[in-house]
Each structure stands twice: as structure tokens, then as C-alpha cells.
Image (cartoon, helix red, strand yellow):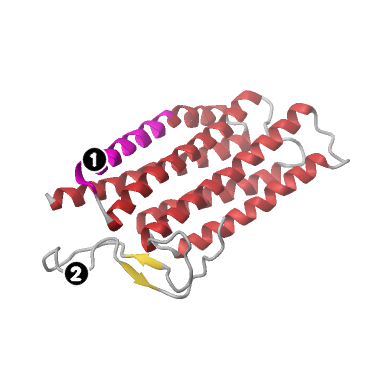
Amino acid sequence: MREVFHQSLEDVQDRIVEISEMVTVAIDKATRAFGTSDVALAEEVIEADAIIDEKAIALDELAIEILARQQPVARDLRVVVSALRTSASLERMGDIAEHIAQLTRMRFPERAIPKGLKGTFRKMGEYDVDVARALTELLRTQDLALVEKLRDADDKLDELHASVFEKVLSDSWRGEAAATVDATLASRYHERFADHAVSVAKKVAYLATGDWVVTTDTIGIVVASSTPETDADSADVLEVGDVVEVTDIDTTTQR
């Protein structure tokens, strides 16, 4: 029975990674479509979002079933609760990728990016793709060193987002109303995508340490894999999820 339970927890984590991989593909296609007015690529993102939604719902149902049948405690409970919250964030990230694709489709055959902002949105798209890839790797390995990388990228996206607003509010802006709306919406979508990624990263840190407020004294990294040579019930055996103390990462900043 214990083996079945742990298999279910592994299934939960595998499904989270799978959804994150799908979100990475979605944001990559969406930002490329947005930059090139590729409506066919945008349609792929829009159609794929329904699959992401279905995967997230299936994950939630599995997590709820584990809670009802197994009544997990301690770290096992954190795994399940974090999965429920993470799936919601990932599903929202998929929605944001879809929204960016919808902007592309709505303005086709015209470009959705207003004049003067192409370079800014190219950088924002690149950062979002990097964020999605780093998040997938974080979920796969639970290497908390990636949390800082995500936060740094989010800071840069915040700066670019602010620069878009400065541009459209400046006296030199000559864009029409539709262009202004497109710029502000698209900028917000790109910025919010990274915000959700950072939110997931904080959940991974919580999963590893059991503490929402993570400092250099308490932060840990989750053992990525486990091949115990002795009885799994032994207290001396490291299993997936055991925490090892490290002191070279500063993640005191809360968002």
C-alpha cells in the first residue's frame, strides 16, 4: 500500500512537469507568432490550450483523490497541496500564452506589435521562454538555484513592462487607440506570465523546505532522485524530497 502511495506522488510530480513542458511550447510559439504575425502558429497555441486545461483538471482530480484516500501528512501533504496550487498557476500561464496568440490572430494580417516597440516585445518574449524553460527544469529537478534565475528574469520583464507604459504615455507616442490597447495588453500578458512562474517557484521552495519564508539558513535542495539500497522505511535512507541544507543562495526577497 505504501508503494502505491509513493507511486501516486511520483505520478503527481511527473504530471506537473508534463504540463510545464506544454506551457513552454505554448509560450515559445505564441511569442514567435506575435513577433512575426504568424497566424497559423497562433492557431496552434489556441488549440493546444484546451489540452493544457484538461491536463490541469486531471492533475487536480488525482491530487484530491490522494487527499481523500491516503490522508497524507508532513512532506507528502505539502506535495499534494503544492500540486493543486501549481496546476492552477501553470494553467493560467497557458491561458496567457493563448491570449498573446489571440492578439496575433485578431490583428492579422496587420502586425500586432505597434511601431517602436518591436525590440521591446522581442526581448520580453525571449525572457518569457527562458522563464518557462527554467521553471520546467526547476519542477523536474527541484534545484533551488533556479529560483534566483527566475526572479532575475522576472525583474527584467518588470522593467520592460514599465518601459512600454512609459512609451505609450509619452508625448511622442503617435499610436492609435487600438495600437495603444494592444501594446498595454501584450505587455501585461508577458509580465504576468513571469509573475506566475515566480509564484510556482516559491511553491517549489516551500515543498523543499516546508517554509514560505526561505532564508539562507533554512533553504534546501530536494534530492533529485533516489535509489535506496536498504529498506525504504529506514530513517537512514534518503528518499525523494529529503532536504539537504545549503547556505549559498539568498532568496529572502518575497514577491
| Residue toward you, 45 or 232 | 232
Residue 38, by quadrant, is top right
Which residue occupies the extreme right position in the image? 171
Residue at figure coordinates x 54%, y 36% from the top left: 96
Q: Magenta residues: mostly which secondary structure?
A: helix
- For image coordinates 37% across by 57% down, the residue present is 207
In this orientation, which residue lies closer to the viewer: 211 or 173?
211
Q: Residue 243 appears at what percent x and percent y?
A: 33, 67
Q: CA distance from mark 1 to mark 2?
A: 28 Å
Q: Is residue 181 magenta?
A: no
Q: Is residue 7 left or right of residue 217?
A: left
Indicate which label's residue lies in the foreground, 1 or 2.
1
Kindly identify which numbered label has been placed on residue 237. 2
> What x and y, as percent, mark residue 41?
52, 31
Q: Which of the two labelled residues, at mark 1 and mark 2, occupies the earlier sequence position? A: 1
Horizontal arrangement in the rendering, residue 229 relative to residue 196 (left or right): left
Disc 2, SS: loop
Residue 3 x, y percent position in the rendering: 14, 52
The kind of residue on which mark 1 rests is Ala
Q: Which residues are magenta?
A: 50-71
Kind of residue indicated by mark 2: Val
> Which of 145/72 is in front?
72
Q: Say if residue 108 shows up in the picture.
A: no
Circle 2 packing at 10 Å, graded few (<14), some (14-19), many (20+), is some
Q: Confirm or deny contact between disc 1 and disc 2 (CB under 8 A).
A: no
Q: Quadrant of the C terminus?
A: bottom right
Residue for badge 1: 68
Residue name at image x 37 percent, y 61 percent: 208
Q: Label 1 crowding class (10 Å Cα cut-off): few <14, some 14-19, many 20+?
A: few
Tag 1 secondary structure: helix
Residue 102 as seen in the image, left or right of residue 118: left
- Point out which mark residue 5 bears: none
